[in-house]
Amino acid sequence: MLRTAETPIEAELESYRRALTGYCYRMIGSGSEAEDAVQETMVRAWKSADKLQERAALKAWLFRIANNVCLDMLGSAQRRATPMDMGPSSGADAPLGDMLVESAFVRPIADAKVLEPTADPAELAAEKETLRLAFVAALQHLPAKQRAVLILREVLRWQASEVAELLDTSVASVNSALQRARATIEEKHLDASGSATVDDAEQKELLRKYVAAFEAYDMTALTALLKDDAAFSMPPWPLWVVGPDSIRQFMTTTGAKCEGSKVLVTQANGGPAFGIYNPTPEGDYAGWAVVVMETSEGRVSGLHHFIYPELFAEFGLPLRLDGEHVGQADELQQPA
């Protein structure tokens, strides 16, 4: 069936998809739910397009709809978190325990869904910072109104008057909500300004070394890349371990099933990421986890393994690889 051409209003709506997805992701903390929220936003907007009085007001109108959709979806849902928010680190020999429901965890999102590659480099670096898992998890501590105000004011750089109009409140109320939200974020030891610079070349080289060490399962080379306080987590399990020694022990005992695995590289939450494929009895490789890598000061500071098969499709990664797949330690090509 031939696809019909987009109408002018549909094309305009589509031009805001990345920005809306980024907003909904920070509000909800789940990539798949953010996409669902944006799709519902588009449907509502298209159905009501004849009610839009001024085309210049389209952006604010769309974000108002998106915010309402997010509030509907959040409802009485539990707050999403990272394993590091749920309790202290465990020993590498601790049992995994019970898996938690998907809605317990902040989930990753592909950079391609939220970042505009042609954006100003400084703005792009700042936006990447506000996609960090820890930052998104910190946002989930805020009441919905404070969360919306902080994202609109500090991340999207809207004026207080614009935010007040979107939320049907006063500028004074917006400023008060922002002040309270900043205080909460500061308690979580996070910078809400997102001003840190991201060195993409340094990250790419660090990722190359990590992938080479991982595919060779060379624990000496791998742990040499880690910071002393590097965190290793595996949602849907709440267990997490910290430090090179514990990570080495975990990967050679409970996590030893990854020996002989292959890797495909992608990007998530403003930084490097990769899919891990474990060998199967049939001789090919099955997708096991999408890993978000965090870096700091030239080393790996976090390795967060999301063991959800559906994430491979969300990241454009195949769920299985054939036995002829060659590791990507040298090329680091992203999937088409």
Image (cartoon, rainbow, N blue to C red):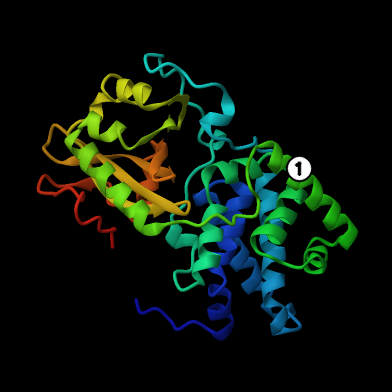
Q: Quadrant of the C terminus?
A: bottom left
User: Observer-nearest residue: 102 or 147?
Assistant: 147
The x and y percentages for residue 186 are: 70, 41
Q: Is residue 251 left or right of residue 181?
A: left
Specify the quadrant of the image occupied by residue 161: bottom right
Could you tell me if residue 315 is visible in this image? no
- Which residue: 58% across, 26% down? 86
Relative horizontal placement of residue 198, taking residue 213 as reference (left or right)? right
Q: In this view, does 248 lie to the left or right of 296?
A: left
Which amino acid lies under the numbered mark 1 shown in the image of this protein? Answer: Ala
Residue at 31% from the left image edge and 20% from the top image edge: 249
Q: Identify which residue is drawn at 67% across, 45% down.
A: 74
Q: Mark 1 points at which residue?
A: 183
Residue 208 percent location from the top left of the image: 26, 49
Question: What residue lies at 44% left-to-right and 69% top-to-bottom?
Answer: 117
Give the class, few, some or many, for how many residues have Cα within 10 Å of label 1's Cα (few <14, many ≥20): few
